Image (spheres, helix red, strand yellow):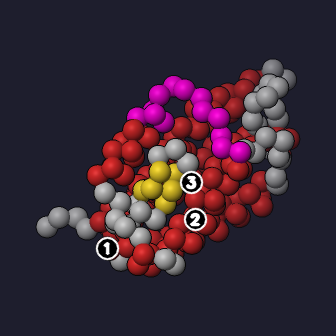
Amino acid sequence: MAELLKEKVIRSFYNLENQRTAILAKIEYLSPEQLAMNPEEGKWNMLQVLAHLVKAESLSLKYMERMFSRREELSNAGISSTIRFQLLKWGLNLPIKYKAPAMADTSGQNPAINELMEEWERVRERLNDLINRCDEDCLKKAIYKHPRAGYLNVRQAVEFMSLHIKHHEKQIADLLKIDQQCVNSF
């Protein structure tokens, strides 16, 4: 029997949660000073990277929640959404740095890590709730609008969030290396 779309979306959500758990495990030993340490002028520190991820997911989810309330009016995400999503996936896998959209730019911010992690948890709980409230028909709707790729369905939105984290994992790994080098130099 073919796997239902809902099962695929739930699996994508669990993969997304596993990524978050892995990131939190990597940074749990860092002090607030280490998290806020700027590696170099004009580059994000760990807090800013994490804040960007949380903010991007939060903004995406707010849009999806708003569209969910109008789901009966929405059209299905079709083949053009699939093509745009494939192009987005391809673009995110390139070793290219992209400028964050202004609304998701976290330059100059240094939120408290506890508040940031609590916000991320709340965003994920709301995303899980949205997924659970969607039936198979709703999951096919163009409920999410990516700034560059346009309208996507719920599964594509969740997979984009996962790709977005993956895109920033090298940045996180580089920041952890810099931090470890600083610790080893003492």
In this rendering, the label closer to the viewer, 2 or 3:
2
What's the CA distance linking mark 2 and mark 3?
Answer: 24 Å
Residue 41 in sight in this render: yes
Q: Which residues are magenta?
A: 90-102
Q: Amino acid at mark 3?
A: Thr
Q: Position of residue 87 (x, y in %)?
A: 39, 38
- Reading the image, the residue beneath label 1 is 136
Asked whether residue 92 is drawn in magenta, I would say yes
First in sequence: mark 1 or mark 3?
3
Q: Residues within 10 Å of mark 3 (few under 14, many from 20)?
A: few
- Reading the image, the residue beneath label 3 is 21
Q: Amino acid at mark 1?
A: Glu
Mark 2 element type:
helix
Q: Position of residue 182 (x, y in %)?
A: 79, 25
Identify whether 132 is placed above or below 27: below
Which residue lies at the image location 76% right of the left edge and 37% below the top edge?
45
**Secondary structure of the magenta portion, mostly?**
loop
Task: Tell which of 181 and 168 is nearer to you.
Answer: 168
